[in-house]
Image: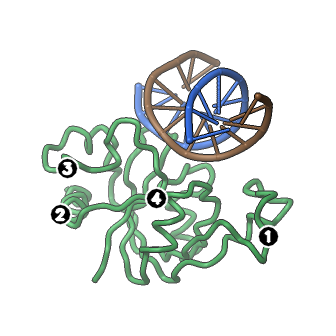
Chain colours: A green, B brown, C blue
Amino acid sequence: MVSYWLMKSEPEAYSIDDLADEKKADWDGVRNYQARNFMRDEMQVGDLVLFYHSNTKPPGVVGLCRVCKEAFPDYTAWDRTSKYFDPKASEDKPIWMMVQVEFVEKFPRVISLQELRDDPKLEGLLLTKKGQRLSVQPVERTHFQHIRKLAKK
DNA sequence: GCCAACGTTGGC
DNA sequence: GCCAACGTTGGC
């Protein structure tokens, strides 16, 4: 059973175009327990993920990728040269986990945060909940399908 | 660049 | 275990 997700990335850090070029990416740098738990405990190979650009104008959903490798340790956590270095993590006790995703498509247009917010069909979407800032979050199937449809408009 | 909202840390 | 201080996220 395929599940649906949304994952955020700042495009200067890693964009949908970067993923389109590289085809696959280790989703490193998640340093939030709730987000980690979703990746570690619930994401399965084949799950579909909306790719969201944050901290840019406009913020919004820009494309689609697919989980191609289930959770494994985020090795950047014990890499001293990484900006994601965490002194409490080690190879023996990784603390942080990530999945690998593969590029599926870049949408022909950005579905902006504003548009998502204004759409009555997307009521209850976690992304548009006040104060909600998880970088990895589940998306309901109906919401996912609606957003995919919007992308083609 | 500002700042609200939230998560984490650490003293007690 | 409480909670103040601090750091981060991320829209605006």
Q: Is A26 placed above or below C2 here?
A: below
Real-space Cα separation, disc 4 to disc 3, in angstroms:
18 Å
Real-space Cα separation, disc 4 to disc 1, in angstroms:
23 Å
Depth check: A134 or A17 in front? A134
The tag earlier along the polypeptide, 4 or 3, is 3
Q: Position of residue A86 (x, y in %)?
A: 76, 57
Q: Quadrant of the C terminus of chain A?
A: bottom left
Same chain under badges 4 and 1? The reply is: yes
Chain for numbered disc 2: A
Real-space Cα separation, disc 2 to disc 1, in angstroms:
40 Å
Q: Nearer the viewer, mark 2 or mark 1?
A: 1
Residue at x 40%, y 42% (from the top left corner): A132
- Numbered tag placed on residue A136 in the rendering: 4
- Numbered tag placed on residue A90 in the rendering: 1
Tell me the amino acid under the disc marked 1.
Ser
Chain for numbered disc 4: A
The tag earlier along the polypeptide, 3 or 2, is 3
Residue at x 49%, y 53% (from the top left corner): A135
Tell me the amino acid under the disc marked 2.
Thr
Sort mark 3 into few (<14), some (14-19) or many (20+) by Cα contacts within 10 Å.
some
Depth check: A90 or A29 in front? A90
Chain for numbered disc 1: A
Q: Nearer the viewer, mark 4 or mark 3?
A: 4
The residue carrying mark 2 is A142
The residue carrying mark 3 is A122
